[in-house]
Image: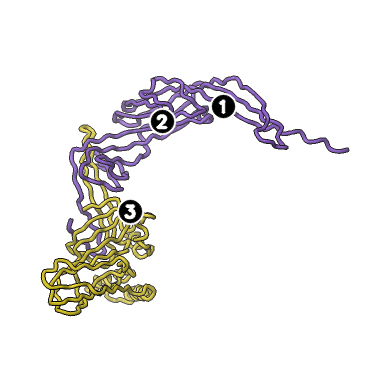
Chain colours: A yellow, B purple
Amino acid sequence: MRINPPCKKFVIFSGGGGLISRSQVVEVPAGQTTFEISEVPASFDPNTTTVELLDITMGDVELSQTDVRRPDKRIVDSFIQREKTASDSIIQASTDLRGSNRDRIIQICESAYYRRYEDMSGTITVSISAKMPSKFTLQINYFIEDTRIKWKPTIHVNINEQTKKAHIEGYLMVMNNSDFNFENVELQFAEFDLVREVGEEGFLDNIEEEQAVQTEMPKTKMLQNLRRMKNLIQ
Amino acid sequence: MRANLHSRENIRIKWFDLNELPFSLERKLEITYSTSSVEENVNNYTPNFQYFFKEVANTQIPLSDIIIFENNLPATYAKTVGSKGNKFSTEPQSDSIVLVTDRIVELIKGKEIIAREPPSYPNPRIKEIEVREREDTVKRKLSFKNDSNEPIEHVELKLVETKDVRFMDSNPAPLNKDSPEYIWTFPIDPEASYSIELKFHTHIRKTFEIEKEPPPKAQ
């Protein structure tokens, strides 16, 4: 059975990536049931993926197996390269540059141009064993290693020299340059000590520069870059 | 906090809002002299300034960019390393408003004492070591000019003496004496200057290796 549990909580790391919690109430008959979780980014970390069965209101169930799989990077990269070439050809061959399809063409080409391995889908398959028909909440937690999703704080201070008092406003800039949408999600922000600093990609003022770095971002191993969590903003 | 985070979008979320927080602007200059720099005709320094904010309770501020507005116009772009307890500060930045000039006023050179001693370790090339020592008295004047139309309420000068350049006296006297650190604090009126005269005692020691004379060549 293919299910798409909504993202309930997303702890975004200052260095990029984060921890995603998705959950959904499911009902299973007696016996073995397999759930395939859709819309899992290929940037998820298979080693730290966990599955929990919560709020078992009726029945007796247990988790029998979790299968995780990521697409082959070399093949995907090859495909993405071909898509980029194709998008260039679409633009060059298009005769509808001022017509009604213009926005659609730009959307397709832009999507192909920015696409990276992390925008592909991985697979998490959960096998549940039930002794009787059961109902429970299936929760999946996984880290994603994607430097294009990150946050950065900015503080605005308005000072009054006469009264020697300040008005301070804190803002969080959250960037999502991936292909994935996170709707009505509980966001938390974790500040990590980073082994190496992550660049300013995505926060640039120059739109051309910003778009260029999205396609040239180094393929880092985010979890290796994180050392110790310093702070969690809820 | 709940939010929609759509693909290819940056969102800005209001995180906190704190009003009526006390702050202070501190301008500091820390100097130390070597036997060479204390006898230079002119030394130029650039002081640093930092904003300090207090009573930031219940808000943990991480490493952040800060934009400081004065009269609703951006005045300073800075960074903070984050809050410590209930306070945080900007990182030190160069202050272009206070111009500091440090000029020599008087140099009284002491009598040079020359002594020779054997090398500390056997060396077939070195005959002996010549040591030249001298004790000088140096008077210098530091001038702090306020290059703005606004009064500066607080500037701090910290002098750190070294083993070869010892602080003797000053006019005005330091507010705080805790050798090797001496601290002066003072205000500066708009477009005005404030001067401090410093007197030092220096100990200069130079060593030279005296080589053995080469053996006479065989006839």
Q: Are marks 2 and 3 on the same chain?
A: no
**In terms of image quadrants, where is residue A150?**
bottom left
Q: Are marks 1 and 3 on the same chain?
A: no
Circle on res. B100: 2
Kind of element beneath mark 2: strand
Q: Residue at x 29, y 38 (%)?
A: B51
Q: Earlier in the sequence, mark 1 or mark 2?
A: 2
- The amino acid on which the numbered mark 3 sits, given as a three-letter code, is Arg
Q: Is residue B81 above or below residue B102?
A: below
Q: Position of residue B16 (x, y in %)?
A: 19, 47
- The amino acid on which the numbered mark 1 sits, given as a three-letter code, is Ile
Q: What residue does disc 3 label? A: A228
Q: Residue at x 26, y 70 (%)?
A: A40
Q: In the depicted view, which residue is nearer to us: B93 or A196? A: A196
Q: Is residue A8 above or below residue B189?
A: below
- Crowd tier of the residue under label 1, counting other residues whose Cα lies within 10 Å: few below 14, some 14–19, many 20 or above: some
Q: In the depicted view, which residue is nearer to us: A157 or A208? A: A157
Q: How many marks?
A: 3
